[in-house]
Protein backbone atom coordinates (compact mmCIF):
# COMPACT_ATOMS: atom_id res chain seq x y z
CA UNK A 1 0.00 0.00 0.00
CA UNK A 2 0.97 3.59 -0.63
CA UNK A 3 -0.12 6.33 1.74
CA UNK A 4 -0.45 10.09 1.42
CA UNK A 5 -1.02 12.22 4.51
CA UNK A 6 -1.34 15.92 5.29
CA UNK A 7 -2.61 16.62 1.78
CA UNK A 8 -2.94 20.33 1.05
CA UNK A 9 -4.09 21.74 -2.29
CA UNK A 10 -4.52 25.39 -3.12
CA UNK A 11 -5.85 26.56 -6.49
CA UNK A 12 -6.99 30.11 -7.18
CA UNK A 13 -9.10 31.80 -9.84
CA UNK A 14 -10.03 28.56 -11.57
CA UNK A 15 -13.11 30.03 -13.28
CA UNK A 16 -13.14 33.77 -12.50
CA UNK A 17 -10.04 34.88 -14.35
CA UNK A 18 -9.59 36.27 -17.86
CA UNK A 19 -9.65 33.78 -20.71
CA UNK A 20 -6.19 32.52 -21.61
CA UNK A 21 -4.73 33.27 -18.19
CA UNK A 22 -3.33 30.47 -16.08
CA UNK A 23 -4.50 29.78 -12.51
CA UNK A 24 -1.88 29.20 -9.79
CA UNK A 25 -1.77 25.78 -8.16
CA UNK A 26 0.12 24.45 -5.13
CA UNK A 27 -0.12 21.01 -3.57
CA UNK A 28 1.82 19.15 -0.92
CA UNK A 29 1.63 15.90 1.00
CA UNK A 30 3.67 13.43 3.00
CA UNK A 31 4.28 10.18 1.11
CA UNK A 32 4.66 6.94 3.11
CA UNK A 33 4.84 8.92 6.39
CA UNK A 34 8.31 10.32 5.60
CA UNK A 35 8.83 11.88 2.14
CA UNK A 36 7.83 15.40 1.13
CA UNK A 37 5.76 15.63 -2.06
CA UNK A 38 5.31 19.11 -3.61
CA UNK A 39 3.67 20.31 -6.80
CA UNK A 40 3.47 23.92 -7.99
CA UNK A 41 2.67 25.73 -11.16
CA UNK A 42 -0.33 26.89 -13.13
CA UNK A 43 -3.17 25.49 -15.17
CA UNK A 44 -6.00 26.61 -17.42
CA UNK A 45 -9.06 24.45 -16.80
CA UNK A 46 -11.08 26.44 -19.32
CA UNK A 47 -8.74 25.60 -22.21
CA UNK A 48 -9.70 22.80 -24.55
CA UNK A 49 -7.50 20.82 -24.51
CA UNK A 50 -6.31 21.39 -20.95
CA UNK A 51 -3.23 23.60 -20.59
CA UNK A 52 -0.78 23.45 -17.66
CA UNK A 53 2.80 24.00 -16.54
CA UNK A 54 3.73 22.12 -13.35
CA UNK A 55 6.83 21.36 -11.32
CA UNK A 56 6.91 18.46 -8.88
CA UNK A 57 9.32 16.91 -6.45
CA UNK A 58 9.56 14.07 -3.98
CA UNK A 59 12.49 14.20 -1.61
CA UNK A 60 14.10 11.49 0.52
CA UNK A 61 11.60 8.77 -0.36
CA UNK A 62 12.55 5.32 0.97
CA UNK A 63 11.67 2.85 -1.83
CA UNK A 64 11.90 -0.12 0.54
CA UNK A 65 8.57 1.05 2.02
CA UNK A 66 6.83 -0.03 -1.20
CA UNK A 67 8.67 -3.30 -1.91
CA UNK A 68 5.41 -5.27 -1.94
CA UNK A 69 4.09 -2.96 -4.70
CA UNK A 70 7.39 -3.10 -6.62
CA UNK A 71 7.25 -6.90 -6.64
CA UNK A 72 3.92 -6.77 -8.47
CA UNK A 73 5.58 -5.11 -11.49
CA UNK A 74 9.25 -6.11 -11.31
CA UNK A 75 10.81 -8.76 -9.11
CA UNK A 76 13.11 -6.50 -7.11
CA UNK A 77 13.47 -5.55 -3.45
CA UNK A 78 15.15 -2.31 -2.47
CA UNK A 79 16.84 -2.86 0.88
CA UNK A 80 18.12 0.67 1.50
CA UNK A 81 18.64 4.16 0.16
CA UNK A 82 16.58 7.23 -0.61
CA UNK A 83 15.04 8.32 -3.89
CA UNK A 84 14.44 11.94 -4.83
CA UNK A 85 12.56 12.87 -7.98
CA UNK A 86 12.25 16.25 -9.69
CA UNK A 87 9.97 16.82 -12.64
CA UNK A 88 8.59 19.45 -14.96
CA UNK A 89 5.59 18.77 -17.18
CA UNK A 90 3.68 21.13 -19.44
CA UNK A 91 0.77 20.82 -21.86
CA UNK A 92 -0.35 23.10 -24.66
CA UNK A 93 -2.42 22.43 -27.77
CA UNK A 94 -2.82 18.76 -26.84
CA UNK A 95 0.92 18.07 -26.54
CA UNK A 96 2.40 17.13 -23.14
CA UNK A 97 6.16 17.23 -22.63
CA UNK A 98 8.57 17.21 -19.75
CA UNK A 99 11.15 15.23 -17.83
CA UNK A 100 11.65 13.34 -14.62
CA UNK A 101 15.01 13.46 -12.87
CA UNK A 102 15.58 10.50 -10.52
CA UNK A 103 18.37 10.45 -7.92
CA UNK A 104 18.93 7.32 -5.82
CA UNK A 105 21.23 8.02 -2.84
CA UNK A 106 23.03 5.26 -0.93
CA UNK A 107 21.11 2.64 -2.87
CA UNK A 108 21.20 -0.93 -1.67
CA UNK A 109 19.52 -3.70 -3.61
CA UNK A 110 20.86 -6.95 -2.17
CA UNK A 111 21.27 -7.69 1.52
CA UNK A 112 22.76 -10.66 3.30
CA UNK A 113 20.24 -13.36 4.08
CA UNK A 114 17.71 -12.02 1.59
CA UNK A 115 15.05 -14.45 0.37
CA UNK A 116 14.29 -14.64 -3.35
CA UNK A 117 10.84 -15.53 -4.67
CA UNK A 118 12.28 -17.31 -7.70
CA UNK A 119 15.08 -17.53 -10.22
CA UNK A 120 13.84 -14.46 -12.12
CA UNK A 121 13.82 -12.45 -8.88
CA UNK A 122 17.42 -13.52 -8.16
CA UNK A 123 18.69 -12.49 -11.63
CA UNK A 124 16.81 -9.19 -11.67
CA UNK A 125 18.28 -8.39 -8.22
CA UNK A 126 21.81 -9.21 -9.44
CA UNK A 127 21.35 -7.11 -12.61
CA UNK A 128 19.88 -4.19 -10.69
CA UNK A 129 22.64 -4.32 -8.06
CA UNK A 130 25.30 -4.35 -10.80
CA UNK A 131 23.69 -1.37 -12.59
CA UNK A 132 23.47 0.50 -9.27
CA UNK A 133 27.18 -0.14 -8.62
CA UNK A 134 28.28 0.62 -12.21
CA UNK A 135 26.26 3.83 -12.59
CA UNK A 136 27.06 5.37 -9.20
CA UNK A 137 28.69 8.79 -9.11
CA UNK A 138 32.35 8.50 -8.13
CA UNK A 139 32.13 11.20 -5.44
CA UNK A 140 28.77 10.86 -3.73
CA UNK A 141 27.79 7.26 -4.61
CA UNK A 142 24.38 8.21 -5.99
CA UNK A 143 22.79 6.88 -9.16
CA UNK A 144 20.85 9.42 -11.22
CA UNK A 145 19.22 9.81 -14.60
CA UNK A 146 16.96 12.15 -16.54
CA UNK A 147 13.91 10.77 -18.35
CA UNK A 148 12.57 13.16 -21.05
CA UNK A 149 9.10 12.40 -22.45
CA UNK A 150 6.49 13.66 -24.90
CA UNK A 151 2.83 12.68 -25.30
CA UNK A 152 1.32 13.68 -28.64
CA UNK A 153 -1.53 12.33 -30.76
CA UNK A 154 -2.10 9.40 -28.39
CA UNK A 155 1.56 8.34 -28.46
CA UNK A 156 3.81 8.41 -25.40
CA UNK A 157 7.52 8.64 -26.27
CA UNK A 158 10.51 8.46 -23.94
CA UNK A 159 14.04 9.37 -25.04
CA UNK A 160 15.75 6.14 -23.95
CA UNK A 161 19.15 7.24 -25.26
CA UNK A 162 19.06 10.29 -22.96
CA UNK A 163 18.13 8.07 -20.00
CA UNK A 164 21.30 6.01 -20.51
CA UNK A 165 23.51 8.96 -21.50
CA UNK A 166 22.50 11.04 -18.46
CA UNK A 167 23.04 8.03 -16.15
CA UNK A 168 26.54 7.56 -17.60
CA UNK A 169 27.30 11.31 -17.36
CA UNK A 170 26.26 11.23 -13.68
CA UNK A 171 29.13 8.84 -12.93
CA UNK A 172 31.60 11.75 -13.26
CA UNK A 173 29.43 14.85 -13.37
CA UNK A 174 26.81 14.95 -10.62
CA UNK A 175 23.21 15.51 -11.73
CA UNK A 176 21.94 18.30 -9.49
CA UNK A 177 18.99 17.50 -7.17
CA UNK A 178 16.64 20.24 -8.36
CA UNK A 179 14.11 21.24 -10.95
CA UNK A 180 15.88 22.69 -13.96
Image: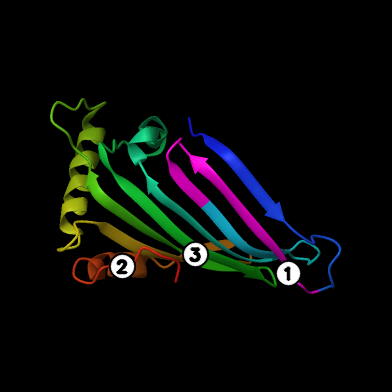
The residue beneath circle 2 is 175
In the figure, 117 relative to 4: above or below? above
Q: Secondary structure at mark 2?
A: loop
The region drawn magenta spans: 20-37
In the figure, 14 relative to 81: above or below? below
The residue beneath circle 1 is 22
Q: Secondary structure at mark 3?
A: strand
Q: CA distance from mark 2 to mark 1?
A: 31 Å
Circle 3 or circle 1, nearest the eye: 1
> Is residue 150 among what the camera can see?
no
Q: Are marks 3 and 1 in contact (CB under 8 Å)?
A: no
Position in image of residue 117 (x %, y %) = 26, 26
Q: CA distance from mark 3 to mark 1?
A: 26 Å
Position in image of residue 118 (x %, y %) = 24, 27
Dot 3 or dot 1: first in sequence order is 1
User: 93 or 178: which is nearer to us?
Assistant: 178
**Which residue is located at x 84 percent, y 73 percent?**
19
- Prevalent SS, magenta region: strand
Q: CA distance from mark 3 to mark 2?
A: 22 Å
Residue 178 falls left or right of residue 38: left
The residue beneath circle 3 is 157
Q: Are marks 3 and 2 in contact (CB under 8 Å)?
A: no
Position in image of residue 178 (x %, y %) = 41, 65
Dot 3 or dot 2: first in sequence order is 3
Amino acid sequence: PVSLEKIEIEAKDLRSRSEGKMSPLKASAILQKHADLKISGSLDLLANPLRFDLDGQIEKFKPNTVNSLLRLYIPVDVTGGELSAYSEVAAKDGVVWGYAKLIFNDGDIISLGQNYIGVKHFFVEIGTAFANWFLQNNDNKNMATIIPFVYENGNFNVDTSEILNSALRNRNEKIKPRID
